[in-house]
Image (cartoon, rainbow, N blue to C red):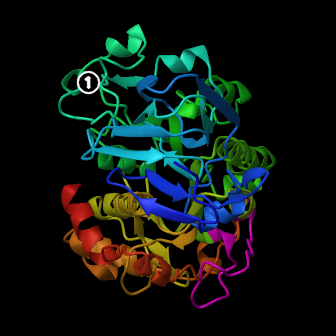
Amino acid sequence: MSIEFSKKLTAHETPIPGVVLYDLPVHGDNRGWFKENWQREKMVALGLPDFRPVQNNISFNEKAGTTRGIHAEPWDKFISVATGRIFGAWVDLREGASFGAVFTAELDASQAIFIPRGVGNAFQTLADNTAYTYLVNDHWSADAQGQYTFLNLADESAAIAWPVPLEEAELSDKDKAHPRLGDVVPMPPKKTLVLGADGQLGKALRELYDGDTSVEFAGRTEFDLGSADAFAARNWKNYSTIINAAAYTAVDAAESGQGRAAAWAANVSAVARLARTAVEHDLVLVHVSSDYVFDGTQELHTEDEPLSPLGVYGQTKAAGDAVVSVVPRHYIVRTSWVIGEGNNFVRIMASLAGRGIEPSVVNDQIGRLSFTEDIAAGIRHLLETGAPFGTYNLSNEGAPQSWADIAADVYELSGKSRDAVTGVSTEEYFRGKSVAPRPVNSILDLAKIAAAGFVPATAADRLQTYLTKG
């Protein structure tokens, strides 16, 4: 069988999700042939994941009929034939609905195939002196062997029609001993790590992902974001995503010398370590931002508005956003006026209402509440749908309100009179106090995340449910 020359670079989907067969242009003349076996720019443009190969391996097989077993490895592979021909067999050994799916094809030097992590790869040579090449995106190590998943070449459910019957083929003893599909432990997906898991948003993420063993949670005691050792101790090859729900949020304390240092350490230095880790290991980094990155002079804050923070807290959040923006695969989720499980404005107002206190509340700062269950759900939506990377505003829907309006709503829902709340200006409220400057307008434009398919509940509905639950 001769190689077909000058084919167009073409991708062909297969029955196994993520497994893509490619036709490669091969150019030949009387001297032989030449092909671009791996050309990043062209192949990424064609849809091949930018999987960043780090090692190139070659399997040389002297005789036709040499058969190498169904091995699913903990990395992605780009496979092609250098010389000769093979019959390839691929079986999905990942957890999920496609577990056990099979694809087979004959390949020569004019073809290649991309095999994602966890898909079993096997081949049988159809010609003497066949060389089979692998580009992989992780370095082989003895430790990694413990993460392999195997399937027996003769598995009845896979029912692979080997051109050379297995009893006549050249096999290793190890491959003969591999389990049938019913005894295979599927390869689990890479993990998501949630940092700041004990905060308001972290608790909402815990509840949302409860029972999902692919999501790990780390609070301050489990993962110290300020420690280089904590980063070095983690095997990042086992992760696909980091959700950073950790932050220094003491807006007024950040204006002090000690608070300023703490805010920069948590919101910038730690975020820079996360960004570097994400870049080095090709992870998705989800980072939660704040309306405080703006000065509040715009009527509606869009995602592309230039950053203009007023105080130290806002400056550190803006710096953190700038750092995360250089990570190729990132989501910056910008929120405002966060309400979740823990101490927050709504809880304080409900407590005051219960004690019969009539508070003065700021009435010239305008925005929307962001309930953590909707922030968490929005993050999961972006990840699960593969929305375009970038920045997304995310608060609850509904008419913008002042803090005084929201306080009055809390009083009314608590069975008290709205008139118990007195509205005052920011200047009046903070007169004589040393506090951070605040944006007067925190209304976030939600059009982008709505276009991505996520529409959060209204703040009014969430507030009523929140107070009912106590």
Instruction: Name above or below for residue 220 compared with residue 416.
Output: above
- Specify the principal SS of the magenta part: loop
- Dot 1 corresponds to which residue? 154
Write the residue at 29% across / 77% down. Answer: 460
Write the residue at 71% across / 63% down. Answer: 41
- Look at the image and say whether residue 95 sits in the magenta stretch: no
Instruction: Name above or below for residue 18 compared with residue 152.
Output: below
Provide the secondary structure element on which disc 1 rests. loop
Q: Position of residue 231 (x, y in %)?
A: 66, 30
Q: Position of residue 287 (x, y in %)?
A: 58, 56
The residue segment tinted magenta is 292-316
Can you name the residue that lies furthest to the bottom here? 299
Quadrant (top left/top right/bottom left/bottom right) for the C terminus: bottom left
Viewer-nearest residue: 15 or 112: 112
Asked if residue 74 can be seen in this view, the reply is: yes
Q: Position of residue 347 (x, y in %)?
A: 36, 58
Viewer-nearest residue: 334 or 105: 105
Q: Amino acid at mark 1?
A: Ala
Instruction: Name above or below for residue 19 compared with residue 221.
Output: below
Can you name the residue that lies furthest to the front here? 30
Write the residue at 36% across / 83% down. Answer: 398
Write the residue at 56% across / 42% down. Answer: 79
Viewer-nearest residue: 245 or 89: 89
Q: Position of residue 383 (x, y in %)?
A: 44, 58
- Look at the image and say whether residue 296 sits in the magenta stretch: yes
